[in-house]
Amino acid sequence: MSGWVFHAPFIHALPGFNLCAVWERTKDLAKQQYPDVRTYRTLEEMLADEAVELVVVNTPNATHFTYAKKALQAGKHVVVEKPFTVTMQEATELAALAQQEQRLLSVFQNRRWDSDFLTVQQIVNSKALGEIVEAELHYDRYKPELSPKLHKETPGPGTGLVYDLGSHLIDQALLLFGMPQAVFADLSIMRPGSQVDDYMEILLYYPAMRVRIKSGYLIREPLPAFVLHGTNGSFLKPRADIQEDSLQQHKVPGTAGWGVEPASARGLLHTEKDGQVVREHVDTLPGNYGCYYELLYKAIRNHAPLPVTPEQAVQVITIIEKAYQSNREKRVVEV
């Protein structure tokens, strides 16, 4: 799903990219939608193709490290789906290898370009709330049934909600507020029959602020996805980005209305402006996952900054590891 929904449409549509090859072990699904693509049956065959400059690793989580390492050693630039790796040790090793091989390495944190998050980021950067003292980031779903993808429901390295949706929320929190001083986490299994964590509440400690990250699969009526409180006021925003649904419907990125939320999903700003208390809705910025690949192109061709750096990817995995440590030891863990 990651390949045909989140990556191939943008690589195919954006100038500067050519969707060249796909590794499919037994099927030919890619050719049905992209007739000119080359299909390889092994990773080694694809990595031997000199025409391939950039490899996107979007396989099950536990394989990210091995495949990304092979691609870097083959002289390719690499994009890794979230989560970057399973452990901090793997993450730091990949970052060092990319530097050694003089190749670019990035993680596809597409939720940085969700319409709702872009709007929240604008509110934080504008200081409309004064100094932020408390924030909550939610990713709520109602999915009581287990995933048909066995690798997602089988206990093992890199499985569970924290590595899945948690990777997005942690990345967003760190982008907004930087690395915390400490972490406390409560992780659990809520769905009948589930064997992997499907509920999480992670508290990030900052000197004068607390950030709560929360997600679960048994939330039929979701709370606002973003709740920010500052010294001047508050901002509440529901999760309403439409891009994933658009991509699932095979809509072409960049067409008219791309990433534009319904007006009913606007955020609520309750704060002070010029000494006056205001309570008003804020127009949502349009989302655009294509920005990730546009910035990546500039990084490869023009040596511009990466859209997501290996250092940022390492930080996310660091918080994930600290969260699991906190849950095991039932205590606050310093970062």
Image (spheres, rainbow, N blue to C red):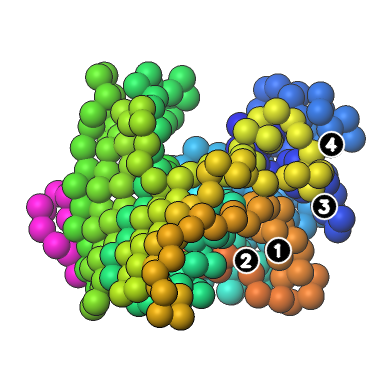
Q: Which residue is mark 1?
A: 296
CA distance separating discs 3 and 1? 11 Å
Residue range in magenta is 321-335
Residue toward you, 94 or 264: 264
Q: Which residue is mark 4?
A: 37
Q: Position of residue 6 (x, y in %)?
A: 65, 42
Residue 105: numbered disc = none
Q: Which residue is mark 3?
A: 14
The quadrant of the picture occupied by the C terminus is: bottom left
Q: Position of residue 23 (x, y in %)?
A: 70, 36
Labels 1 and 2 touching (C-beta < 8 A): yes
Mark 4 vs mark 1: which is more N-terminal? 4
Residue toward you, 3 or 278: 278
The quadrant of the picture occupied by the N terminus is: top right
Q: Position of residue 43 (x, y in %)?
A: 66, 41
Q: Which residue is mark 2?
A: 307
Element at label 4: loop
